[in-house]
Amino acid sequence: MRILKQGERHRVRFVLNGEPVEGLAEPRLLLTDFIRHEIGATGTHVGCEHGICGACTIRVDGKAVRACLMLAVQAEGKRIETVEGLAAEDGALSPLQLAFHRNFALQCGYCTPGFLMTLADYLERYPNPTEEDIRVALSGNLCRCTGYAEIVNAALEALEAAKEMHGAPTEVGVS
């Protein structure tokens, strides 16, 4: 095994929102910083950098994770989805994004990408949650501006819209 010298960088390749990407990363570089600064996808926000606030939530190989707790080199060969990947290719917002808009489920918007990614993951895995289930699922995401009611209402509306559009609520996060 070769030991890297300080400042030496690894090539990191993965699929981001359906597109192959690559860049160079020092072994200690966080995935949030790599996605934002090396790749240029700035929708993933950096909040606490300790995995507590949820602002950096993305999906890695289909599972919601905190990008601030993952190193860029750990993303090698993975399939990563960020908030930019929720909208359709033509830019049309997903049912979940539309529900956030209609329900005023954001104020400053800083935490919104994390909430959207958490909900997209949760609602696809659990297609018939109660309001209480949604509140529990969101308990790992922090917002300093809203009272959460609008976010929960948006999630419930997105579920109903997905049921009407697709006959099943499994398409909440993506169009």
Image (cartoon, rainbow, N blue to C red):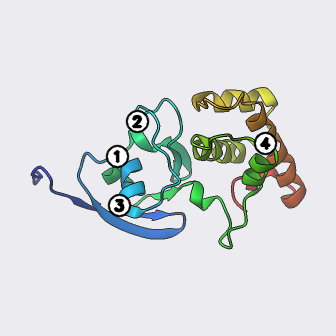
Q: Quadrant of residue 18?
A: bottom right
Gap in angstroms between the C-alphas marked 4 and 3: 33 Å
Q: What residue is pinned by disc 2?
A: 49
Q: What is the secondary structure assignment of the residue under circle 4?
A: helix
93 on left or right of 26 = right
Q: What is the secondary structure assignment of the residue under circle 2?
A: loop
Q: What residue is pinned by disc 4?
A: 154
Gap in angstroms between the C-alphas marked 2 and 4: 27 Å
Q: What is the secondary structure assignment of the residue under circle 1?
A: loop
Q: What residue is pinned by disc 1?
A: 30
Gap in angstroms between the C-alphas marked 4 and 1: 31 Å
Q: Earlier in the sequence, mark 4 or mark 1?
A: 1
Q: Which mark is residue 47?
A: none
Please identify the quadrant where the C terminus is shown.
bottom right
In front: 67, or 110? 110
Dot 1 amino acid type: Leu
Gap in angstroms between the C-alphas marked 2 and 3: 18 Å
Q: Is residue 20 above or below residue 132?
A: below
Q: Earlier in the sequence, mark 2 or mark 4?
A: 2
Specify few, some or many for label 2: CA neighbours under 10 Å numbering under 14, 14-19, or 20 or more.
Answer: some
Gap in angstroms between the C-alphas marked 1 and 2: 9 Å
Q: Quadrant of residue 114?
A: top right
The reply to whether callout 1 and callout 2 are in contact (CB within 8 Å) is yes
Q: Earlier in the sequence, mark 1 or mark 3?
A: 1
Q: What residue is pinned by disc 3?
A: 38
